[in-house]
Amino acid sequence: MDTFVKGTYRKRIFQGNNGFIIGLFKVEEASNDLDDFIGKTITFTGYLPPFNEVDTYLLKGNLVTHPKYGDQLEVTSFEKILPSDKDTIVEFLSSDLFKGVGKKKAEKIVSVLGEQALSIILEHPNDLILIDGIPQKLAMEIHHTLLTYEASYKTILSLTEKGFSTKDATLIYSKYKENTLFILEEDLYRPFYDLEEISFKKIDYIAQKEGIEETDFKRIKAITYYTIKALSFTSGNTYCEKEEFFSSLTKILGFPIEIDIFEQACYELERALKIVTIEERYYLKELFDDECYIAQRIRMLAHKKKEPYSLQATLESLEKENHIIYNEEQKEAIIEAICSPISIITGGPGTGKTTIIEAIVKVYQTYFHYSNQELKEKLILLAPTGRAAKRMSTKTWIGSSTIHRFLKWNKEQNTFSINEFNKSSAQFVIVDETSMVDTSLMASLLKGLSANCKILLVGDSDQLPSVGPGNLLQDMIASEEVSTIRLKHLYRQGKDSNIISFAHGIREGKFLDETLEKGEDLSFSETDEFKLLKEVCSYAMQYQKEDSFQILVPIYKTHCGIDKMNEELQQIFNPKAANKKEIFIGDVLYREGDKVIQLTNFPDLNVYNGDIGFIEMIKTGKKKEIYINFDGNHVKYTPASFSSFKSAWAISIHKAQGSEFDVVLLPMVSIYRNMLYRKLFYTGVTRAKKKLILIGEKKAIQLAISNTNAVQRKTSLEEYLKNGII
């Protein structure tokens, strides 16, 4: 039986521009699982039209428990029960919805028009003028208010009958208001262009049910837009070339079209400000704008004069105080970061990037005589992931934050409160793991910073690029417009660390067999794909008591991919036990004690994509809940958010970026061939701090090191930085 409550709307807590609402609801009736709320109020959330305090509503959805706000009903659909008896109609007409009516006038209206008052007002508004005390202007206002009120529900009902969910219908109505049905009649695909939340596949399914032909030009134009979005967000490119674009479009369509139809679709999309075409390059408009904005801001900062600060004495004082000696390379990096409007520090593992960040913070505070509180306000440390931010925090007392948290990201509306209209007052921002920052996020960060804010970007340009479109760190370095310090001297674990030597060999494309035979911190065990899982499990048993042990795997599928590996590893790390509760999420079994990784950002809960935690409690009763401990941050999950994490005994190398582990086990076999390339392998290797265990085939390792072609992103930032915006 559906979960539902029936009753009346009481109060609005939050109302977004897109129809998202949080409110209080007085429950009169409820399904069995919510009968505890009868006679009480329940908090509800959802994408819904405005409610009034008079009508009776039936809300259907899922009961979830927010860690901060408690039980909430996530509404998926609703019904409105129109007022019918005289007293209810009086209460309705005298509510805040109808300005200038009041109780006395409402009573007069009902006494004359009776229980059919609302229908009469809708169909014959002039009848209101016959009532004493109701002038024509007020009659028309009452009619218009009631018409608008009814239209929203009727429109949303019409959309849900077509196949849209209540959420999607509300989003569409919030965008187009009274023009909704007219706009959709003109072009049913229009919401796909205008609303990020409306997927093409869903709207295309509805369109085909409505009888739209697969060769209809409006459908082809929508698929053209869908194609360029898919190309951008799967390839990481900020533009695509004409031949690739046209070829991909025909594959998605499933039938050939003439090139002039493609060109006409692109022309209309460009006129609608959805794409940008420059010669044979095709950009999503938002990616083009973001790349241009980044280039303009970076060029402006790069061409500003350096500050003539004399930091030598401060450096020498700190060296004495902390019993440390910075070499010339480090001193240059520290001085450049503080004196330059924008600079980059890049280097491989063990070159002391984090140590230099710590030194920059100390020198900056000492030189300008900032108190601890002043420093916290003026200098901000940022990273793209929660784990990377936490790692920075361990090295500096002022703490650090994810970029999303710093910009005050609103998840529901996908907007930042810190933006071009509400800039941060920070004077110096340091961003670590910059290679992971994509074009959209960098543009948002720059918009939130004042024109005079210094920026230091730190990262390893040989690591994997961002998941989203762009190749920012490499493009900025390659442009030679931004002052860049390359760290080459090895510090971490000492010059003779086998992991560090191996990683630097990978960067240079070198692989020597003897590298794998040198010492305890780096080992290699030869096996094939059919014995791999057994070998991985054998090593897992040896290291299962290590707090910081992680298995990294290039792919999810196959008999030795991440998914299969997690099934087997669960039996080693967290076997079935009478005192451990279990739950299936889809076809995956989770139990108390399981290691999991967060897949999405939950800024309100301080949990971010890539964070790793352990399931500490599972509730399987009427209210299913899972509690996960992320390094002391205890987060509650309900069925609506169960898809936001997955098993993490083995994780992908992409997900591990920005993290470090004492011991890393890295399988490498030929069946992974589609994901065997230098940047991926290098990133996996450099996650290991103390010990790296390689298992698999030497030929797979050789292939990964020699393959430099897997990630060649098409971007324009380097060109725009060198030459300015065309």
Image (tube, rainbow, N blue to C red):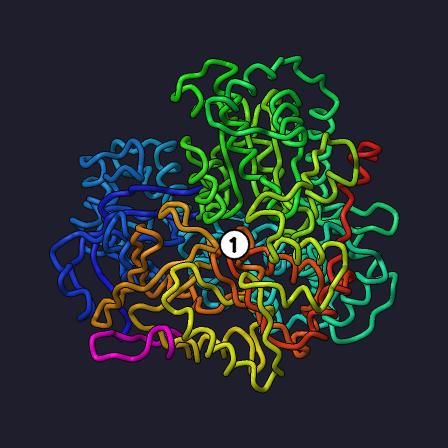
Residue 123 seen in render: no
Which secondary structure, mark 1? strand
Counting other residues with Cα less than 10 Å from the Cα at mark 1, is it few (<14), some (14-19), or many (20 or more)?
A: many
- Counting labels gives 1
Left or right side of 3 for 436: right
Which residue is more in the foreground, 507 or 403? 507
Residue 582 shown in magenta: yes
Residue at x-position 18% and y-position 41%:
107
Which residue is more in the foreground, 212 or 65? 65
Residue at x-position 88% and y-position 47%:
279
Where residue 686 sits: x, y (%)?
59, 55
Where residue 570 sits: x, y (%)?
39, 76
Which picture quadrant has residue 502? bottom right
Residue 279 shown in magenta: no
Where residue 164 sits: x, y (%)?
49, 64
Which residue is more in the foreground, 722 or 147? 722
- What residue is pinned by disc 1? 689
Amino acid found under the numbered disc labelled 1? Lys
Left or right side of 700 for 637: left
Q: What residue range appears in magenta? A: 571-585
**Vertical placement of residue 222 versus 107, above or below:** below
The quadrant of the image that shows the C terminus is top right
The quadrant of the image that shows the N terminus is bottom left
Which picture quadrant has residue 420? top right
Residue at x-position 66% and y-position 34%:
344
Where residue 119 sits: x, y (%)?
33, 53
Residue 666 seen in render: yes
